[in-house]
Image (spheres, grey):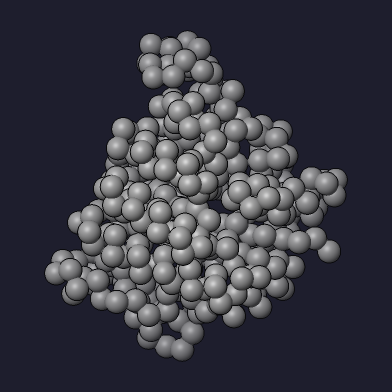
Amino acid sequence: MFLKIDMHTHIIPERMPRFAEKFGYDGFIHLEHHKPGFARMMKGGQFFREIEANCWDAQLRIEEYATHRTQIQVVCTIPVLFSYWAKPQDTLAVAQFLNDDIARLVADHPKHYIGLGTLPMQDTTLAIQELERCKAIGLVGIQIGSNINERNLNEPEFQPIFEACQSLGMAVFVHPWNMMGTKHIEKYWLPWLVGMPAETARAICSMIFGGVFERFPALRVCFAHAGGSFLPTIGRIEHGYNCRPDLVAVDNPVNPRDYLGKFWVDCITHDPVMLRYVLDMVGEDKVTLGSDYPFPLGDLEIGAFIETMGLPEATLEKIYWRNTLDWLGMI
Ligand SMILES: [Zn+2]
């Protein structure tokens, strides 16, 4: 049996302060535990999503993912809790609360959990301050949004944060959220089905064309959902770079295809044909096992489809755990 580390999972503290009351304005997430084992995530007064105990109960999660032959989860918060839109000091307070909760979880269950933090990305100084604290309390990286209040990840204010991640050896997980065009595509769950993959492509293109990987060559970045629509459209992106460098290559002269193999992506494709393509594109050293547990759009069988692909054992070993530890700087 293989060791399996699921590096894309979300968790929330069972008890959350009423941040809206504490800070005097609305928009923060709180939980209403309306029946045993279930809670309503509320954003302001509005219902956001119903979650189950496996969203917060550490032991229940361990037992649940053990049934899918997975021993370890890398955990991070749910993107809707990023709270980048709030006053920076308040986002910092939310981040500290969430990061402390994950640090405690990791300390209590060191064989079953690895933790990523969240930062007040809209304030460079506070973000770096909290990044340093994340490292001190035992987290090994951070999760950030695909955009920060509509600002792309190539913007100057984010560069010192990436620089600090590089120098502290903190891994970066980029997760889609705040999906562009949401209000035009609300029907059919399109923000999740169309918006999220586009958001991840937006983040990768912003980082490539903005020269982030040139500036910080030792920065270790992993993108959610197999890089969203980036890899399936790399041909178009490269062609755009070739035919209109005046639009595309204004900040970085390097061909976007040259970055394939320099960042990690998780395996969440729900499709063996697509995963084989992803492996071809970024190489078998850069694909990690992820699930998006415990949410229904995730791969809740935690990579069972990979077992049907007939991949060599050495490749499976890389996907299941080795590449994740490499991304996290743990081997
Ligand atoms: Zn996720």
Toward which corner of the image does residue 226 lie, by quadrant?
A: top right
Compared across the picture, whether 201 is left or right of 84 comes to right
Compared across the picture, whether 23 is left or right of 37 comes to left
Residue at the outermost left position: 24
Measuring from the top left, give residue 95's x and y in whole percent: 35, 62
Toward which corner of the image does residue 280 lie, by quadrant?
A: top right
From this viewpoint, is residue 266 visible?
no
Q: Against 96, is 196 above or below?
A: above
Residue at the outermost bottom position: 36
Q: Tell how many labels.
A: 0
Quarter holding the N terminus is bottom right
From this viewpoint, is residue 17 visible?
yes
Camera-nearest residue between 194 and 2? 2
Measuring from the top left, give residue 83's x and y in whole percent: 30, 58
Q: Which residue is drawn at the image coordinates 23% and 55% (left, top)?
A: 88
Q: Against 285, is 81 above or below?
A: below
Measuring from the top left, give residue 187's x and y in whole percent: 38, 53
Q: Against 118, is 219 above or below?
A: above
Measuring from the top left, give residue 248's x and y in whole percent: 41, 18
Q: Which residue is drawn at the image coordinates 78% and 51% (left, top)?
A: 317
Q: Against 71, is 7 above or below?
A: above
